[in-house]
Image (cartoon, rainbow, N blue to C red):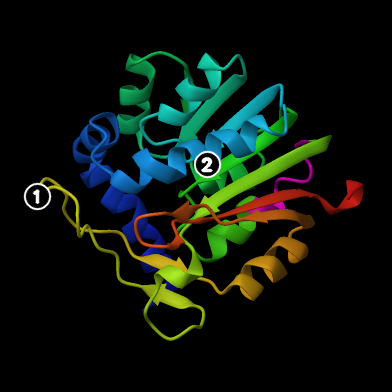
Amino acid sequence: MEDSHFEDAIVHSWHKNVNAWTSAVRGAEIRSRVTVTNAAIVNAVVAKAPKRVLDLGCGEGWLVRALTDLGLSAVGVDVVPALIEKAAASGGDFRVMSYQAFAGGAWSQTLDCVVCNFSLLGKDIVADVLAALPSILSPQGHCIIQTLHPAYSDETYCDGWRQGSWAGFSDEFTEPAPWYFRTLSSWIAMFSDCGLQLKEMLEPLNTETGKPASVIFVLAPATYA
């Protein structure tokens, strides 16, 4: 099956699950987020003291609101108009923008931080997005990515598409999105290819399972590293 089919299926899934996702996030139904990963990404961003932050793939907007409450200037973009409507209705600066548009230069303002919080699920489009970052990050800027830890997968440890699942979520969810699994070495090689250098790698621990709840990559433009 073509990569483009999987990429399209990701976007289609999010169009289908706007209400279910918004309810789950705002109703604190996703335990790992409540206990570990939400605080982990907020702390990682705040630690870099950015003045202007972009949440790329912002969903219903919780992270933008959290950062704004802490005094940061934050903007969120997402490809799904209904998610942006949900986000804007609760206050904040939100805009509809696809990853293709972003990679093609639709965003031109200089940023101190670009955050991708569990929002890089695809294959080629992820590299396209990351390659666009060095030109818009400030000299001391960072990209901070939180994603599933490679230890999460019980399948063979190699790059490839994986079937999505809403296991553990409410029955409101439907048509789970596929996602592209990368080994740690593949992530790091892609960063280098895109003009970014890995500065830190954090592994927030789920104390209930004793396993990493996620991995957080803190990147800087290689030119300034």
Residue receiving disc 2: 40
Q: Secondary structure at mark 1?
A: loop
Q: Is residue 7 left or right of residue 71?
A: left
Identify which amino acid the numbered label 2 is placed on. Ala
The residue shown at (36%, 73%) is: 162
* In the image, farthest residue toward the left: 171
The residue shown at (58%, 35%) is: 43
* In the image, farthest residue toward the right: 224
Q: Is residue 139 above or below residue 180?
A: above
Kindly report which numbered mark, 2 or 1, lies closer to the viewer in this rendering.
2
Q: Is residue 132 magenta?
A: yes
Q: Is residue 82 above or below residue 165?
A: above
How many marks can you see? 2
Rendered location of residue 129, percent (x, y): 61, 51
Residue receiving disc 1: 171
Magenta segment boundaries in residue numbering: 130-137
Rendered location of residue 55, percent (x, y): 54, 34
